[in-house]
Amino acid sequence: MTEEEIGVALAGVPGWRRAGDEISRSYAIRYHGGVAMIVHVADVQRLIGHHADIDLRWGRVRFGITTHDAGNRLTAADFDLAARIDAIARAHAAEPVAD
């Protein structure tokens, strides 16, 4: 993706932050709720064939997304997954928090 395309795609997933060739977002959620949310995300990731890096901490889950198969660069698949994660987070009553 070009820088312009990345900017447009990033605007389409408010709350996600870019650091180099990765986008990330964190959510506040109780630990066991976070586990359930991760399982839900993992099931969707398996179906679409695209995976985020996931960091589960007490009270917080962080997702980092880049396309490993494209040399760790951002692709449209990353922004699609970000939108899917947002929807799953809402379904699990996870609250977005700053990284």
Image (tube, grey):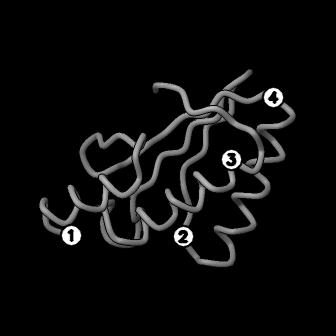
- The answer to whether 72 is drawn above or below residue 58 in the figure is below
Q: CA distance from mark 2 to mark 4?
A: 24 Å
Looking at the rendered structure, the secondary structure element under dot 4 is helix
Pointers 4 and 3 in contact (C-beta within 8 Å): no
Amino acid type, callout 4: Tyr
Near mark 2 (Cα within 10 A), the count class, few <14, some 14-19 or many ≥20, is some
Q: Which residue is mark 2?
A: 50
Q: Nearer the viewer, mark 2 or mark 1?
A: 1
Left or right of 2 in this view: 42: right
Q: Which residue is mark 3?
A: 90
Left or right of 9 in this view: 61: right
Amino acid type, callout 2: His
Identify the image quadrant of residue 52: bottom right
Q: Residue at x 35, y 40 (%)?
A: 17
| Of callouts 2 and 1, the N-terminal one | 1
How many numbered marks does the figure carry? Answer: 4
Q: Which residue is mark 4?
A: 31
Residue 91: x and y, percent? 75, 50
Q: CA distance from mark 3 to mark 1?
A: 28 Å
Q: Residue at x 20, y 55 (%)?
A: 7
Left or right of 12 in this view: 7: left
Pointers 2 and 1 in contact (C-beta within 8 Å): no
